[in-house]
Amino acid sequence: MSSFDVEYWREVLRGVSIPFNHPRRDSLLIREKVVEGFLEGYVVPQGLIAHGRGEAFDYLIGETTIEPAIEAMKAAVALLLISKHPVISVNGNVAALVAEHVVELAREVNALLEVNLFYRSKSRIEKIRDIFKRYGVEILGTDEAYECTIPELFSERRRVDCRGIYVADTVLVAVEDGDRTEALKKMGKNVIAIDLNPLSRTALTADITIVDNIVRAFPKMVEIARELKNKTRSELETIVNKFDNRSNIAKVLEHICNRLRDIASSLMNKP
Ligand code: ATP
Ligand code: MG
């Protein structure tokens, strides 16, 4: 095999099935979806690495949605509901794992969807566009005629849709790189981030950071949106104003520390 051969890898992977009683079955099935996105050509190799980094933090958190994440989700949904022009930014990993729930959330909070890629290519954009089309949504960021640029950003992600992120007041990013999050903040956007690493630049730069796996966070946010939609604007504003991102991230770190300390002491106490 001289160059990367998709059919070869499909054949290799076909030979392996994950047993139903495998203790890490759920995690492995999620991993398979990202790999499938890679073989389809819309997840980049760097997306696989990013996913692995996310898995590592998820292991530390306990692979569950923790209370500080719920608090952050409530604030995020409230902010999306009171925003004039909210946009959810999507990429290859998001498309591979949670396209359906992203579409549902966008409908509940009246947000637009826009594709934004670090490694931008026409073919990746079209593949991601087609995935969202299956759920009945036409995403922004696919038409060069509507291209605006984010100042100070030097990767391909500086290109944004003039009808979407460029004019948005609030942007939700997930599995996103720190440079872009910082650039969106410099443009004066409210930024909501979903990121399993509480220490990433994205997590520390965003206004609201949801430290959770996107496969759990998006469906949960749909539920929360259905509850919060009945609140008044001033009730929603109160939820947003009461939220303090730095102390929320601190609670996540405390959760990880306590959990690791408990595990360590149970290992020490074992006969
Ligand atoms: P930063 O650039 O913000 O400092 P980084 O360079 O470590 O972070 P990137 O590859 O730029 O990381 O961004 C990907 C981020 O997405 C990582 O922080 C990773 O933990 C997170 N991530 C990966 N998979 C998931 C997932 N399924 N759910 C939520 N977050 C995820
Ligand atoms: Mg990065």
Image (cartoon, helix red, strand yellow):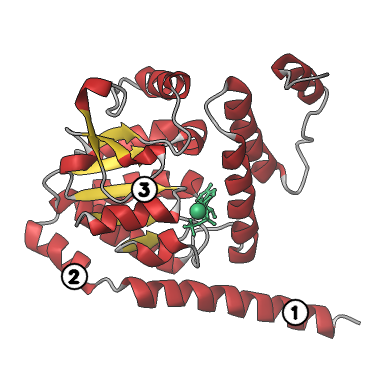
User: Which residue is disc 1 drawn over?
Assistant: 264
The amino acid type of the residue labelled 1 equals: Ala
Residue at the image position 45 percent from the left and 25 percent from the top: 121
Residue 227: image location, x then y, percent:
25, 51
Residue at the image position 81 percent from the left and 78 percent from the top: 267
User: Which residue is disc 2 drawn over?
Assistant: 241
Where's the C terminus, which quadrant? Answer: bottom right
User: Which residue is disc 3 drawn over?
Assistant: 173
The amino acid type of the residue labelled 3 equals: Val
Residue at the image position 49 percent from the left and 66 percent from the top: 198
Residue 236 is left or right of residue 47, and the answer is left
> Which residue is nearer to you in this view: 253 or 107?
253
Q: Is residue 109 visible?
A: no
> Which residue is nearer to you in this view: 90 or 75?
90
Q: CA distance from mark 2 to mark 3?
A: 20 Å
Between tags 3 and 1, which lies in front? 3
Packing grade of label 3 (10 A; few <14, some 14-19, many >=20) is many
Q: Earlier in the sequence, mark 2 or mark 3?
A: 3
> Which residue is nearer to you in this view: 29 or 128?
128
Q: Are marks 2 and 3 in contact (CB under 8 Å)?
A: no
Q: CA distance from mark 3 to mark 1?
A: 34 Å
Vertical side of 209 occupied by 52: above or below? above
Residue at the image position 64 percent from the left and 39 percent from the top: 31
